[in-house]
């Protein structure tokens, strides 16, 4: 068996970045983590988590989340409500579309966070 344990994401402000992603995804608030309590863990399903760690230099990452249709719809609503630009193409995160015509899924959105990380949500 191979399973992802966690994904580390560099952030200028680890707490703010973790809280914003938790708000968008509709998950629980992040938990303080790390030996110096300077990291923030966002728990996902099956024991997997995203760990935001403070960094001055950011190399943007692409992280994709698969959710069910109901959660997907609520994420799209939250993106709109929060005024976060999104799109259904990785190279056009501002087109405001959530359909997945190109890849054949039920829906897909991409959005950038304050650090330049590309997050994707699909169902």
Image: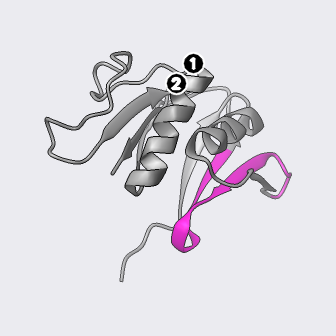
Question: Which span is picked out in magenta?
Answer: 35-52
Q: Which residue is mark 2?
A: 80
Instruction: Give neighbour class at mark 2: few <14, some 14-19, many 20+ (Cα, 10 Å).
Output: some
Tag count: 2
Alpha carbon separation for disc pair 1 and 2: 5 Å
Q: Hey, which quadrant is residue 21 in on the image?
A: top right
Check disc 2 and report its element: helix, strand or loop.
helix
Q: 103 above or below 42?
A: above
Q: Quick check: is 43 in the magenta stretch?
A: yes
Query: Between residues 61 and 84, which one lies in front from this camera angle?
Result: 84
Q: Residue at x 81, y 46 (%)?
A: 38
Instruction: Give neighbour class at mark 1: few <14, some 14-19, many 20+ (Cα, 10 Å).
Output: few
Disc assigned to residue 83 = 1
Can residue 63 be spotted in the picture? yes
Q: Residue at x 33, y 51 (%)?
A: 123
Disc assigned to residue 102 = none
- The x and y percentages for residue 85 are 47, 19
Q: Hey, which quadrant is residue 4 in on the image?
A: bottom left
Q: Residue at x 38, y 16 (%)?
A: 94
Image quarter in which the N terminus is found: bottom left
35 vs 82, left or right, is right
Q: Hey, which quadrant is residue 73 in on the image?
A: top left
């Amino acid at each position: 068996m191979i399973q992802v344990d966690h994904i580390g994401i560099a952030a200028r402000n680890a707490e703010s970045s973790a809280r914003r992603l938790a708000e968008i995804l509709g998950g629980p608030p992040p938990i303080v983590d790390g030996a110096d309590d300077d990291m923030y863990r966002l728990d996902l399903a099956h024991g997997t988590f995203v760990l935001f760690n403070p960094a001055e230099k950011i190399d943007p990452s692409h992280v994709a989340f698969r959710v069910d249709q109901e959660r997907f719809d609520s994420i799209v609503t939250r993106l709109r409500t929060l005024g976060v630009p999104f799109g259904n193409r990785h190279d056009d995160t501002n087109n405001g579309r959530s359909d997945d015509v190109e890849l054949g899924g039920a829906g897909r959105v991409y959005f950038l966070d304050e650090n330049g990380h590309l997050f994707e949500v699909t169902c």
